[in-house]
Amino acid sequence: MSKETILILNKERGDSSHLKTFLEKEKYIVLPVNTIDRLLTNFQEFEVSGVIVDLNADHLYLSEIIKKIRERFPKLYVMMMADGKIGEKEHQKVIETGVYDFFVKPMPFEKILFHLKSGLKQRKKYLQKRAES
């Protein structure tokens, strides 16, 4: 079984490096990026299975970019995290982008891993079904 590649978009390098180390121990290939441009470039360079995005990733069009990525890769697992609670309107906007899971930081890495494994398992089932048809 090949390792699955996970991108982490977060402007806080410390947050990304700790999560990266944790997920690598679980046998994932983890690529932390701190810009939207680098995130998009990685989609051209790697077969990406999942993305973990910080809502505060410092980009005005983050929701639109996630929507476009999801259109191109419809079964890509996307998780989003935020530093604090967000309003109902912003929460609805996040859900409409196609994010599967949304968490408020701090979030235990074990819980992130649980949701990541679950989301990637669903993605794998979908891709296998599609390959069989």
Image (cartoon, rainbow, N blue to C red):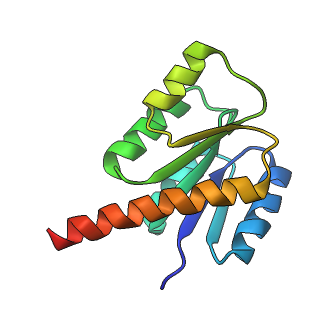
Horizontal placement of 1 versus 26: left or right?
left
Looking at the rendered structure, the number of numbered marks drawn on it comes to 0
Residue 50's spot in the image, x, y percent?
A: 52, 58
Residue at 22% x, 64% y: name it: 130
Please say whether residue 45 is visible from this viewpoint: yes
Q: Place residue 84 in its image quadrant.
A: top right
Q: Is residue 76 left or right of residue 52?
A: left
Residue 47: image x %, image y %?
A: 44, 68
Q: Which quadrant does the C terminus fall into?
A: bottom left
From this view, report whether residue 52 is shown above or below residue 49. above
Give coordinates of residue 83: x percent, y percent: 78, 33
Q: Residue at x 39, y 45 (%)?
A: 70
Q: Is residue 92 left or right of residue 28?
A: left
| Residue extending furthest toward the right | 14
For residue 55, side relative to residue 89 (left or right): right
Image location (x, y in percent) of residue 65: 47, 37
- Residue that sits furthest to the bottom in the current view: 1
Q: Quadrant of residue 87?
A: top right
**Vertical relation: 29 (above or below) 71:** below
Where on the picture, by quarter, is residue 56? top right
Q: Is residue 42 visible?
A: no
Relative depth, front residue between 121 and 19: 121
Q: Nearer the viewer, residue 32 or 112?
A: 112
Question: Is 127 drawn above or below residue 27 in the view shown?
Answer: above
State whether residue 117 is above or below residue 79. below
